[in-house]
Amino acid sequence: MTNSSSSKKHGQDQPEISGPTAKSQRTKMGKSEDNEKKNLGKKLKDVEISVPIVYGNVAFWLGKKASEYQSHKWTVYVRGATNEDLGVVIKRAVFQLHSSFNNPTRVLESPPFELSESGWGEFEVAITLHFHSDVCDKPLNLFHHLKLYPDDENSSMSTKKPVVVESYDEIVFPDPSEAFLARLQNHPVVNFPRLPAGITLPHPLPIEDASKRRRGDTKDHPLSQWFTNFSEADELLQLAAARQQVQAHIAKLRRQISLIDGQHQQFKSSDQ
């Protein structure tokens, strides 16, 4: 991959985050078009399948002898939260770099979904994920601020310890097709929830050769020592979602109690 320079941005509205740092969120995809018309089998209503992903960058300072415009070597990527192969869900990833790069639109047709460059500037990278036809027919757009420099201006840069910024996102696919479930229900990249009563899973397809499946994972990635451990991220999201449900239920009960109190006061007034 050729080396290119980029435009450095300062004075961002939001504070820059240097790493390792983790931000978590949950993205629910829109429902796909009628899968039955695409011969993918019927949809399973009231079922949600989630795929945890991580996207971010690792940036190494190249030292004092490096060119002013090639001061850092960086890699931006999308990976499985537990470093599993995302190629079974993601068909294609498109990275949009700064316009100063040669060929700023980079299309990756197979995992690992990453690219490496060198430069001196920070900018926003737009990432578009396209899924296999039995997963979702709508792309997902992500945005990542490429981070090269530590937040603390007084801290010295090191050629051995990189700047790492990663975000966790749990992609949720509602009403999945039977073809999707049959293909991936035994794959570790997919999280399966407890199914509603009466729903029977389709017969799983044979798991592909293990060596083939490992080609797209990042367990032995040369940068894996710098990756953030997100093993508890999905559990934290589930706890947050449960807390929101409890708070909503408490608010509903308070409204009901307030309504009952109001009716009770009306009865007391009418009796007087």
Image (cartoon, rainbow, N blue to C red):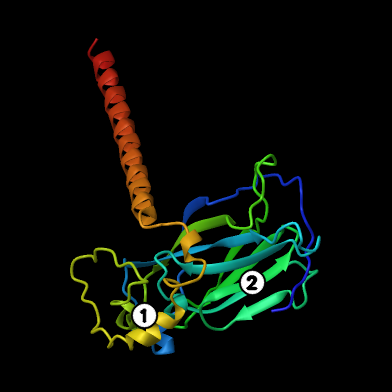
Residue situated in front as seen by the camera: 247 or 63: 63
Q: Residues within 10 Å of mark 1 (few under 14, many from 20)?
A: many
Query: Residue 135, located in which quarter of the rendered image?
Result: bottom left
| Quarter that holds the C terminus | top left
Q: Residue farthest to the top?
A: 272
Q: Residue at x 46, y 75 (%)?
A: 32
Identify the image quadrant of the N terminus.
bottom right
> CA–CA distance between discs 1 and 2?
32 Å
117 in relation to 265, above or below = below
Specify whether 249 is left or right of 228: left
Instruction: Name the spot of residue 227 as percent of width and height, x first.
Output: 48, 60
Mark 1 vs mark 2: give the one in front.
Answer: 2
Mark 1: amino acid = Phe
Residue 73 appears at what percent x and percent y?
67, 65
Left or right of 210? Residue 127 is right
Q: In what element is the residue under mark 2?
A: strand
Per the image, the residue denoted by label 1 is: 180
Extreme residue in the front direction: 65
Q: Quadrant of residue 155?
A: top right
The residue at which mark 2 appears reads as 116
- Which residue is at a point 37% across and 74% down the rendered structure image? 176
